[in-house]
Image: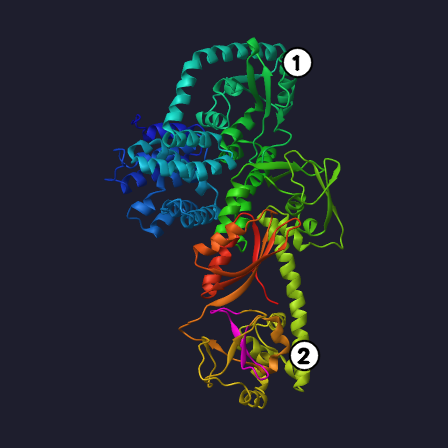
Amino acid sequence: MKKDLITIDDFMDKVDEYIKNPKEREKILDAYYYAKEKHKGQYRKSGEEYITHPLNVALILTSIYSDSECLIAALLHDVIEDCDVNIEEFKEKFGLTVYKLVDGVTKLGRLHFSTDNEYLVEYYRKIIVGMSEDVRVIIVKLADRLHNMRTLWATPIEKQKKKSKEVLEIFAPLAHHLGIHKIKSELEDLSLRYLKPTVFYDIADKLNKTKAERDTTVYEMQEEVTELLNERHIPHKIKGRAKSIYSIYNKLDKGKKFSDIYDLLALRILVDTEQDCYLVLGLIHSKFRPLPKRFKDYIAMPKPNMYQSLHTTVFGIDGYLFEIQIRTYEMDEIAENGIASHWAYKENGGSNKTANLQSATTQKLQFFKEIMELSNDKMSSEEFVTSVKEEVLNNNIYVFTPKGDVIELPRGATPLDFAYKVHSKVGETTVGAIVNGSIVSLDYELKSNDIIKINTNKSAHPSKEWLNIVKTTGARNKIKSYFSKNEKEVLIERGKVYLEKELKKRKISLDDFYQEDKLKKVYKNLKLDSLDDLYYNVGNSKHTPNNIINVNFGEKEEEKPKLLKNIVKVNDSASDIIIDGIDKIKVSFASCCKPVYGDDIVGYITRGNGISIHRSACRNLASMDDRCIKVSWDDKPTNKYYSDLIIRTNTIENKLADIIQTTIKISVNISSVKTISREEYATYEMEVVVNDKEHLTKLLLDLNNLSYITSVERLMQ
């Protein structure tokens, strides 16, 4: 299975093809000899000296014209992890940029994970960390994984399958979104070879058996097209395009027969200018009848990874179907080599070309920006993974603004997702949508090539129902943020009213309370940041007005002792509640907020019925401040606790069996459940019995992970 070993001379010959600066060449050689010395005595499982691996990784990167820093990082990518290296010396010798690249690759290389969700989550998060500073970390990692796949034969079968699965699920999609077709295609083929060897070799055998016939047919078609273009004096180059084994497998897996895969016969025509592309297309269509609905113009409407080309399928010689791609040489470089090719062009091109390519690079990096936005949103790890897989790594749709700008969205997206993608303000003020000239509902499912116009009204605002309509996490979080912000403003105003009402009641002047030094003392004691923060904490019942006032003006001592004398005493209390200085008091749990063990709680002195325990956030406490006392949980709880949940779904189907099964798995009992809405979406109200807050939180997370559930909340009446 071993291939001929490459040498440093082979590698440098490739470097010399596009890196002309002697100083950069010298740095690359320094890196190679440094790595060779550090890896001395180390060997790969395939038997070769270890240095062959980083050398091959760097060689792969020369095929996509990676810059010198990227090549140096590739040569050094294992030395920090596997060798005795002084970090400061390394930074001084190779520079901070190269160190950051190597460090990023090293972090990714340390991951040892199974397909269990926990490890998958961590893996995605580390990928984001790697990308956040420099996308070249991922490019080096892709080349590293490609060479490892080329030598995967030397590892046990179980590991072969595990690594191949990782490649198909994570690395190949990343290569695709970076537009690096060469690496993507080979990663996919190698993965299929180890995951489904019988299928792989069966397809390879069929391709070999038909190769001679296909080569002859392609040659004849190529001659005809060449003659046609030469007659019009159009400079060009034509080459046959091989269909990858994995792409054939995908079509067979969808039910196609091998004989029906017409784009096994394919040509790629390269010309000098964009204008020539369209001219060539017209000439080919004038001689060879095109197959309807098979023309795609990715020049006028590039893919998000900046792929550009004209695609058409025609009836060629002897009636064979040919898929023909037409593009410029520059488009071909970008399509094959992805973002790395931009650096090569930037070095060699003029100012206009450089500006255009810098713009293209920015657009191509939008993919990574989207993942970064997802990672910055406040969501659970499970939600993050689902979002990345569904919104970023899945097949997406491409729709248009009325001006022709391309917007990428996940399948199933709605006009609201489109509106929020354009701008948050557009989303917030949406009142309607027009798709392809027709008015549609806001929950209309968009399709590729739709042209969408959003109607807005400055006085409009989001509806909570939109949370059940939008598909993208970004739109959902922006809607939640809007309501959170507005609710915060309401709570701030409410807190101010409650506080000033209590000040008036206690005959404390506003001027006295709002003295700067006294406010600073309140902020410090209660760990608050500002006056708005103070009002907000009163409004949401985290702090009572008297808690705030007492920092500077002392407690009102006269009332609570008198009230406590009158509360009901009992012989025993097994309530898990401790009330300082008082034993054997009748305690009950408030039905309005149903606290569970572990919640922040407050006691309320009832009239003749002991102490009622509320959650600190209970809205009812705002009007009961005078009768509230401090309580705490016992260290050794003995009770079970009831909690009310509201569960909203995005389907009218009855999902109770699934929901109940989820509760059973973690030993949560259900005391009652009812369906409260079944018009468009099913909504359930459920009372559960749990051990403590941690037990309840686990249930909320598990329910939220069910694909059809849009939200799960604890009820507070």
Residue 406 quadrant: top right
Mark linked to residue 192 = none
The residues colored magenta run 595-614
Q: Residue furthest left?
A: 41
Residue 305 place in picture, x, y as percent: 55, 36
Mark linked to residue 286 = 1
604 within the magenta span: yes
Q: Which residue is mark 2?
A: 500
Q: Nearer the viewer, residue 715 or 375?
A: 715
Location of residue 659 with respect to 714 vertically, above or below? above
Residue 640 place in picture, x, y as percent: 46, 68
- 424 displayed left or right of 236: right
Residue 530 place in picture, x, y as percent: 60, 71
Instruction: Give the alpha-carbon distance from disc 1 to disc 2, as whole Å.
Output: 83 Å
Location of residue 356 with respect to 594 vertically, above or below? above
Looking at the image, can residue 262 be seen?
yes
333 within the magenta span: no
Location of residue 328 with respect to 286 vertically, above or below? below
The residue that appears at 47% across and 65% down in the rendered structure is: 693
Q: Secondary structure at mark 1?
A: helix
Residue 283 quadrant: top right
Q: Which sits earlier in the primary sequence, circle 1 or circle 2?
A: 1
**Around disc 1, counting alpha carbons within 10 Å, would you say few (fewer than 14), some (14 to 19), or many (20 or more)?**
few
Q: Nearer the viewer, residue 342 or 678?
A: 678
**Around disc 2, counting alpha carbons within 10 Å, would you say few (fewer than 14), some (14 to 19), or many (20 or more)?**
some
Looking at the image, can residue 23 be seen?
no
Amino acid type, mark 1? Ser
Amino acid type, mark 2? Glu
